[in-house]
Amino acid sequence: MEKVKVALSSNSYDIFIGSGLMSDYELIGRHIEKKSVFIISNKSVATHYLDRLVSSLPGFDFSVYLMPEGEQFKNLRTIEEIIGVMLKKGANRTTTILALGGGVVGDTAGFVAAIFQRGVPFLQIPTTLLAQVDSSVGGKTAVNHEDGKNMIGAFYQPKTVIVDTDTLNTLPEREISTGLAEIIKHGILADSSYFDWIEKNISKLRRLDSETLKYVVAGSCRIKAGIVSEDELEIGKRALLNLGHTFGHAIETATGYSDWRHGEAVGAGLVMAADLSFRLGMCALDDAKRIKALVTESGLPFAPPGSMEEETFLRLMSRDKKVDETGLRFVLVRGGIGDAALVERVPLEKLRETLRAGENLCSRA
């Protein structure tokens, strides 16, 4: 079992990574202070893992809410319904919430935990690659608004994150690819040798080689935990984790949070960010091409929907959380793979060139 520390000024916690951890009574049980437990999951995940989780925790009083599946249900209506069920089931400030599922479940459950009776403890038990390497780590909890992704939320840290890598064996190929987008992002922004390793092992990752997956989950968790430990509330360095997300969130919003998965939108967003970085003279064309090639090899789209117009992008990006008093900001590649920077006042003509590039992203065409 691997252990990664998220070291914060208060509320520090560990991420545990290994095989079979969902059945580890001692590990999970020691992070639940009282007997009342409320599990938030969805039907697909519950079919595989709910009974296993409940049976591994004898002596606790369980209630369960199964969310509808899909990013489009990560909204305030679902939050209100969950809280209504919790109240009917007698949940109180001693209740611990367990988030059992992918990023949609984790984000939603974490936000419920942050606001229910002014905050109750919760545990993240992520079951998708994307959630294991990214969304379950760092305490960002949120739901979507029809005009913007993750616009309603709070920073609220879990008691622990328990990553059972066995859950990846039941994921469809598309879900593995969506997780690879965030893994690639970590290499681009923080560690060129990690990016090199991903390039060399991408076929093993897509084949679900167990040792390779354990290595990459721990590697990405360490990168993100290190950044979060320096900047828990995203007032500085943590903003770098939004690499590719300004473009990606616009794609998700434009497609109604349903046609494109989050990782697919981020994959295209990473290529668009690399293209813009090249156009601004911040990175070499060869680096941009490597990013595009790795995104493509991961089974991800490298360009936004062909039907998405420039003005739609600009309108949606203007509402993004990276906007401040200076206007729209982008996280871009600086100098080369392994380094990134937050850039303000990007020239509009260069941004429009990227938005128009389509299939010719990261090329001189």
Image: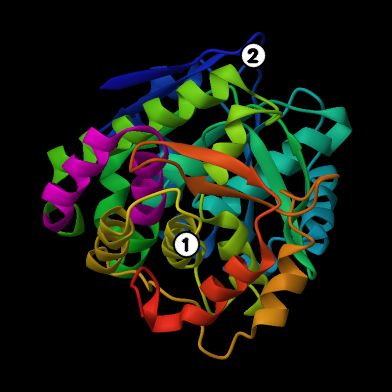
Distance Cα–Cα, label 1 vs label 2: 42 Å
Local SS, label 1: helix
Identify the mark nearer the N-term, 1 or 2: 2
Q: Going 71% across and 64% down the picture, which residue do you hit?
A: 317
State the mark number for residue 341. Answer: none
Q: Which residues are magenta?
A: 179-203
The total of numbered circles placed on residues is 2
Is residue 62 positioned above or below 322 on the image?
above
Q: Which residue is mark 2?
A: 11
Q: Main secondary structure of the magenta part?
A: helix
Q: Which amino acid, mark 2?
A: Asn
Mark 1, residue position: 279
- Left or right: residue 282 versus residue 292 is right
Residue 334 vs residue 60: left or right?
left
Kind of residue at disc 1: Arg
Judging from the image, the colouring scheme is rainbow
